[in-house]
Image (cartoon, helix red, strand yellow):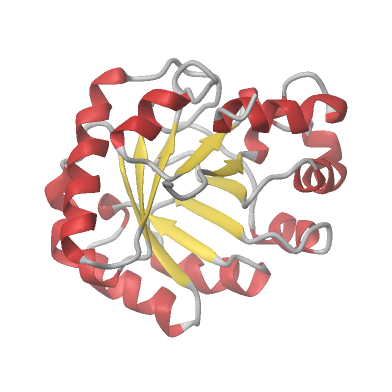
Amino acid sequence: MPPRVRIAPSLLAADQARLGEETAAIAAAGADLIHLDIMDGHFVPNLTIGPGVVRALRRHTALPFDVHLMIAPVDPFVAAFIEAGADLVTVHPEAGPHLHRTLALIHGLGRRAGVALNPGTSVSAVEPVLGMVDLVLVMTVNPGFGGQSFLADQLDKVTELRRRIDRSGRRIALEVDGGITPETAPQVIAAGADVLVAGTAAFAGGAAAYAGNLARLRGDD
């Protein structure tokens, strides 16, 4: 039996006035991780939250914080987000001059490290550091805003990464983020993803609907 697909709801789609309550509610509904999108208005065209908000949210759940840093330069901010409660820190190859050094910094601070690939970023960008990553994130939208349409042409990238990860023999999570719905989730799972980031599809309908939303994304309902 294949491993259970993990769901990482993105708080970008939660009620921003009630982030603490939303974090607790989605955790209680069966989320596996909490995905935090950190945007700087420079590397991507949007602004979201900083380390202070991450620290404030940490007391609302024991689930791992999956922190996606869409900021450049990224190295000066890694320690602050780890100190705030990040368990896994994902960075983009384009966000600093030395990806290997950035990943070593994250590991040196005792956390897991990931690499995110934008739609225009080749699989080859992660190949030189595949031996030191814990997660590869494939963006199936261009990062910056929630609610975008799924880019189906990125499925080949997921398939290729699944092949390379399996060939490496390492336990590396393969995460997909962007336009994930009950309709697109089966496609990315079939391509080889084992972690799904979902925003709107996870938080639709309010807290009473969250458990059902997550079950539909996993294909359990």
- Residue 75 position, x and y percent, is 40, 68
Q: Nearer the viewer, residue 70 or 65?
A: 65
Q: Looking at the picture, does residue 57 appear above or below residue 212?
A: below
- Residue 123 position, x and y percent, is 17, 45
What residue do we see at 32% from left, 54% from top?
A: 95
Can I make out residue 38 in this image? yes
What residue do we see at 45% from left, 31% from top?
A: 45
Give the quarter of the figure containing the C terminus.
Answer: top right
Can I make out residue 140 in this image? no
Residue 81 lies left or right of residue 175; in this view the side is right
Q: Quadrant of residue 22?
A: top right
What residue do we see at 45% from left, 70% from top?
A: 112
Q: Quadrant of residue 126?
A: bottom left
Q: Looking at the picture, does residue 180 appear above or below residue 168?
A: above
- Residue 61 position, x and y percent, is 79, 58
Residue 93 lies left or right of residue 160; in this view the side is right
Number of marks in picture: 0
Q: Looking at the picture, does residue 136 appear above or below residue 85?
A: above
Q: Nearer the viewer, residue 172 or 105?
A: 172
What residue do we see at 57% from left, 67% from top?
A: 87
- Residue 175 position, x and y percent, is 41, 45
